[in-house]
Amino acid sequence: MSHTTEDRSDPREKVAAHHRAGSGNVRVPYPIGVRATTIVARHELTPRMLRLTLGGPGLDGFHTYQADDHVKIVFPDLDGTLRAPVPNDQQMLDWPHPMPPTRKYTIRRYDAAARELDLDFVLHDGGLASTWAEKTQVGDAVVVAGPPGAKAFPHTYDHYVFAVDPTALPAAARWLEEAPADVSAHVVIECDDPAEHDYPLPGRPGLEIVRLVREGGGSTLADVVRSLDLSDRAFLFAAGEAGDIRPLRAWSAGRMDALITGYWKRGVAGLVED
């Protein structure tokens, strides 16, 4: 059972106020819902990235106000039983025990009027969500839980650096669409396959994209970010494989405000490292 006294009222305005005039990162909780949706479209973005569009009236009242908001997809057990969480009177969820299989995915787009939610899946052999995404079809039912809230960072810095791998491209792309036009950004992307760099990113003034390909399994992402010539008022968003971005934690400390999140770790299923 969840027991919390967090104030989850008016999250849209709380996030917007921090975007306008805040500093650093602030945690803004949302009322957490469980949504019964249906797949309404499939679109191959690259040979290794698939977009699923979820839709339906279950998305009414959905909350998402920050570029890296995420939901959990709730998968059936091996016997086909779906054990979804249940909302409680504290605007949170009571999860069954043991926990059902879930995976977290960043919200690329939410259109309230169309009742549509876009989630982008990196395709790889053997992954629970990847295997499901490749097999699922338009018309299939999907249950999602969340988002739990935002780790909001302001839109008031002079420059932004996004250090990402494909798993964090949806967050970077959404930020490029939603952030004010008068701030500049570097987006440093590291992929295993050059074809992954075909992922569509919105253009904007002052944007520089650096595309890297891992050679022999080694990452140069942190080294490239540390070599950038940055202004004193820069913000770092680093997300992707936990080990690849970890060097940026110590490097950014005392140097710039940052939000650094391990979305996954080699050899570990379902990791999120904050």
Image (spheres, helix red, strand yellow):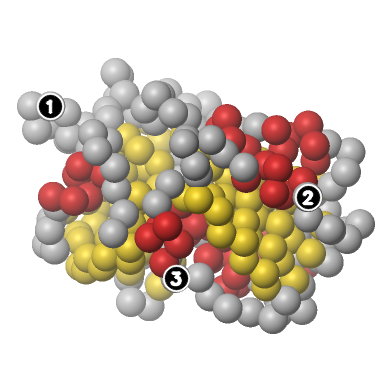
Q: Dot 3: few (<14), some (14–19), or many (≥20) neighbours within 10 Å?
A: few
Left or right: 201 as drawn, with respect to 26: left
Q: Which residue is mark 2?
A: 227
Q: Is residue 197 above or below residue 274?
A: below
The reply to whether the C-beta atoms of the residues labelled 3 and 1 are less than 8 Å apart is no
Q: Residue at x 78, y 55 (%)?
A: 228
Disc 1 marks a residue whose amino acid type is Leu
Q: Is residue 7 visible?
A: no
Q: Position of residue 2 (x, y in %)?
A: 47, 27
Disc 2 marks a residue whose amino acid type is Ser
Left or right: 198 as drawn, with respect to 236: left
Q: Position of residue 30 (x, y in %)?
A: 54, 49
- Observer-side mark, 1 or 2, equals 2
Measured in 3D between alpha carbons, the distance from the residue under mark 3 to the one under mark 1, in whole angstroms, is 35 Å
Q: Residue at x 33, y 77 (%)?
A: 114
Left or right: 179 as drawn, with respect to 198: right
Q: Position of residue 188 (x, y in %)?
A: 62, 56
Q: Dot 1: few (<14), some (14–19), or many (≥20) neighbours within 10 Å?
A: few
Left or right: 168 as drawn, with respect to 143: right
Measured in 3D between alpha carbons, the distance from the residue under mark 1 to the one under mark 2, in whole angstroms, is 47 Å
Q: Earlier in the sequence, mark 1 or mark 2?
A: 1
Q: Which residue is mark 1?
A: 78
Judged from the image, the secondary structure of the residue bearing numbered disc 3 is loop
Judged from the image, the secondary structure of the residue bearing numbered disc 2 is loop
Q: Residue at x 14, y 52 (%)?
A: 136
